[in-house]
Image (spheres, rainbow, N blue to C red):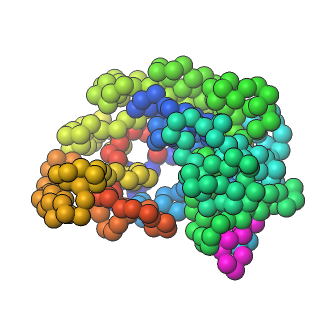
C-alpha cells in the first residue's frame, strides 16, 4: 500500500468534476444502455433493487441492496419477494415516490421488443416467467407483480438462487414509465429521469454530457455524497487526445494509454497526481467461427489449442501491457460470479490504469 492509499484525500464538496467519456454513449436510458461508456452516465442517474460494489480486496465485485431493503426467497429458489425502500422519489420534474408498481412498469417496458434498440441486453430478463429465450415478453412479464405497494414478487422459470446478483444491471433500474410515454419515449431517452444522485442537464451528442446534483436524492449524506455540484463529461474520440487534455488540466482523470503506464506513474509522483489500477467489470475474448474450414469444428481443435498455448501470457501482461491486466484464475475473470454459462471462449481478467487529480 502506498502513501496515497494509506491516507486517501478527503472528499471535496462543491464545484464541477470533469470525467471523460471515451466515446459517444450508445444510450443512457435503461432500454438503450449497452456498453461501459454509457454505464458511466447511467449509474449516476438510475438505481435499481441492487448495485455492484467493489469489496475491500479491490478485485471482487459484490452485489449489495440499493432500492431493495431485503428479499424473501422460496425454498426452490424460483420465487423472490423484494421489499422496496420507502421515501425514494423520482428526480424533478416527476417527484413521485417509487413503489413496487414502478418496478413492474419499468421491467415490462424494457422487456417489450417495441422499446428496444439494436443491442439491448434484454437477455438479463430471460429467467423470468413470461419471456422467451431472448428476454422478450411480447405479452408482458407474467412473472412480475406488485404483491402490495412495497413488495415486488418475481417468479422464475427455473431455480436460480443467484438471480439477485443480476439485478444491478441498468436494464432493471426503475424509471417513471408513465411520464416517459407521455413525453414520448424517444424524447425521454435523450433526457432520462431516474432516482440517482445526479440528473441529466445536457447531452450534446459527440461533444459532452453534463449532470447536476439531484436535490432530492434519498441517500444524500456526508458519507455517501453527492460531493460535487456537477459532473462534466466531455466526449473524446481517442485516448491520446484525452491523455493530452488531462495533462493540460482540462479534465480531472484519464485512462492511461497502452505503453505509457510506467512513465505516467513516474509523472504522477512528480506532479502530485494519483496513479491507480482497479478492476473493470467485463470480459474480453477471442471468438472463432466454428464453421470456418481452417479453424472451426472438432477436427481443428488441436490447432486452436496450439494457438492458445503459443501465447506467452507473462510477456504479454508484464511487457506489452506493463503489468496492468490480471492473470486469469478460472473460466471467468476474478470478481465475476460464475452462475449460468452456455459457452465459454477465451477469457481474461481486466484491470484499468487511471490517473486522477485529488479525487478518489
In the rendered image, residue 219, in percent from the top left (x then y), is placed at 70, 49
Residue visible at 43% across and 39% down in the picture: 358
Q: 36 or 358: nearer the eye?
A: 36
Q: How many marks?
A: 0
Magenta extent: 74-83
Image coords of residue 241 (percent x, y): 31, 24
Q: Is residue 308 left or right of residue 145?
A: left
Note whether residue 155 is visible.
yes
Q: Position of residue 158 (x, y in %)?
A: 62, 70
Locate the N terminus and report the quarter of the image it occupies: bottom left
**In the orientation shown, which residue stands out farthest toward the bottom?**
75
Measured as percent of width and height from the top left, residue 171 is found at 61, 46
Report whether 155 appears left or right of 344. Answer: right
Q: Quadrant of residue 202?
A: top right
Q: Residue at x 73, y 53 (%)?
A: 141
- Could one spot residue 82 in this view of the protein? no
Q: Nearer the viewer, residue 293 or 11?
A: 293
Above or below for 55 versus 43: below
Amino acid at each position: 500500500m502506498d502513501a496515497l492509499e494509506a491516507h486517501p484525500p478527503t472528499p471535496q464538496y462543491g464545484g464541477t468534476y470533469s470525467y471523460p467519456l471515451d466515446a459517444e454513449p450508445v444510450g443512457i436510458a435503461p432500454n438503450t444502455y449497452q456498453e461501459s461508456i454509457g454505464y458511466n452516465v447511467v449509474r449516476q442517474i438510475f438505481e435499481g433493487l441492487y448495485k455492484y460494489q467493489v469489496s475491500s480486496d479491490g478485485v471482487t465485485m459484490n452485489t449489495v441492496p440499493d432500492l431493495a431493503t431485503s428479499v424473501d426467497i422460496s425454498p426452490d429458489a424460483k420465487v423472490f419477494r423484494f421489499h422496496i425502500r420507502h421515501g425514494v422519489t423520482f428526480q424533478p420534474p416527476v417527484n413521485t415516490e417509487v413503489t413496487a408498481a414502478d418496478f413492474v412498469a419499468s421491467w415490462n417496458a424494457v422487456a417489450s421488443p417495441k422499446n428496444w434498440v439494436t443491442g439491448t441486453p434484454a437477455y438479463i430478463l430471460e429467467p423470468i416467467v413470461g419471456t422467451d429465450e431472448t428476454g422478450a415478453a411480447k405479452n408482458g412479464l407474467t412473472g412480475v407483480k406488485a404483491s402490495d405497494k412495497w413488495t415486488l414478487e418475481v417468479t422464475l422459470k427455473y431455480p436460480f438462487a443467484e438471480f439477485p446478483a443480476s439485478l444491478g444491471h441498468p436494464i432493471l433500474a426503475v424509471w417513471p414509465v408513465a411520464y416517459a410515454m407521455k413525453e414520448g419515449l424517444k424524447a425521454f431517452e435523450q433526457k432520462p429521469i431516474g432516482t440517482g444522485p445526479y440528473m441529466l442537464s445536457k447531452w450534446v451528442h459527440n461533444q459532452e454530457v453534463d449532470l447536476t446534483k439531484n436535490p432530492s436524492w434519498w441517500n444524500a449524506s456526508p458519507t455517501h455524497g453527492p460531493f460535487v455540484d456537477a459532473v462534466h463529461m466531455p466526449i473524446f474520440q481517442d485516448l491520446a487526445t484525452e491523455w493530452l487534455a488531462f495533462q493540460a488540466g482540462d479534465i480531472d482523470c484519464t485512462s492511461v494509454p497502452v505503453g505509457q503506464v510506467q512513465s505516467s506513474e513516474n509523472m504522477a509522483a512528480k506532479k502530485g497526481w494519483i496513479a491507480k489500477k482497479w478492476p473493470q467489470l467485463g470480459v474480453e475474448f477471442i471468438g472463432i467461427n466454428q464453421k470456418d474450414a481452417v479453424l472451426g469444428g472438432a477436427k481443428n481443435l488441436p490447432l486452436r489449442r496450439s494457438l492458445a498455448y503459443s501465447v506467452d501470457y507473462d510477456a504479454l501482461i508484464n511487457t506489452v501491457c506493463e503489468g496492468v491486466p490480471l492473470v486469469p484464475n478460472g473460466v471467468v475473470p476474478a470478481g465475476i460470479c460464475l452462475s449460468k454459462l452456455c459457452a465459454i471462449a477465451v477469457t481474461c481478467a481486466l484491470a484499468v490504469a487511471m490517473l486522477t487529480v485529488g479525487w478518489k
